[in-house]
Image (cartoon, grey):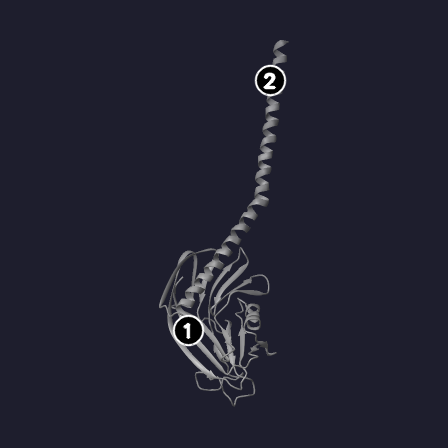
Amino acid sequence: MQTGRNSKKGNDHAVSEMIGFVIIFGIIIAGIGLVTLYGYPMLLQQQSSSNEQIMEKNMIVLQNDLKSLAYKTVPYSETSLNVGGGALTVYNTTYDTADSSKFLIFGENGNPLTCSIKNNNGNCAISSAPLTFYPGDLRYDSTSAQTGLSLENGAVVKRMLAENGSAMLAQPRWFYDGPTNTAVIYLIGFNTTTDIMAQTGVGTVKMDLGLTNYTSYNTAGDTIHIEYTPNINADYSTAWDNYFTGTLGMSPDGEGGYYFVQMPSTLIIYTYEVEIESV
């Protein structure tokens, strides 16, 4: 009889240990599940946000390199950077011009007599034949962060991939000088050895200054218009529209473009070709 009672007590101890193990194991599994369900997505979101902020800083650095090449006539620049969470791609000035972004500059429609701006062929650059410039862009797209950044015509611009709208993080060097009644426009385009160059991870962006051009136009008595047409895959219309109206003080012309209210007597256009050797 004594032996039976001892055996029953031993079984009770085994059952108690098993219940404790199941409870502890269940708590561990529940903890792992909560971390996976809530913690991991937050970690990925934080990583995407960090990659986005790093690329914003990288674009500002590349813009400073571009300024050194164009404005300070530094012949060559080389910058190492880490591209995380997306890809950095260069689209040159001749890549898919039918769908790429472009800038149009022309005199007042219906006023060809002054012919203040001419195309390379010598014809008047009125609205029917405007001075057309394709800048290309150095573009970063991140599907994880759902954002896009571009270094386009000297400006750093940002957009959301799944939404409309855009913002200008760093402005180009365009300006209107009141005392001399002069408008100055800088046009900066990218050229590459291939149509598209792309990079992910750690790489080096190598740029050098190519052809440059300086033209001064006597625009007295004429109204100067600027029109931006966005790339169908990277629309920064809102950013450039706000820049034209907010910074340059231009007004909409009702046809998709903007005009200088001040009617500058002189228009100076600088054109720079920047060769990107590698990214």
Residue 40 lies, with reference to residue 2, above or below; the image says below
Disc 1, SS = strand
* Number of numbered callouts drawn: 2
The residue carrying mark 1 is: 272
List the single residue furthest toward the left.
75
Q: Where is residue 11 shown, x and y percent of the image?
A: 61, 19
**Label 1 sits on what residue type?**
Tyr
Q: How many residues crowd mark 1 within 10 Å: few (<14), some (14–19), many (20+)?
A: many
Q: How many residues crowd mark 2 within 10 Å: few (<14), some (14–19), many (20+)?
A: few
Asked if residue 97 lies left or right of residue 42, the reply is left
The residue carrying mark 2 is: 10
Asked if residue 273 lies left or right of residue 236, the reply is left
Earlier-in-chain disc, 2 versus 1: 2
Q: Nearer the viewer, residue 34 or 58?
A: 58
Q: Where is residue 269 shown, x and y percent of the image?
A: 45, 78
Q: Nearer the viewer, residue 164 or 151?
A: 151
Residue 244 lies, with reference to residue 278, above or below; the image says below
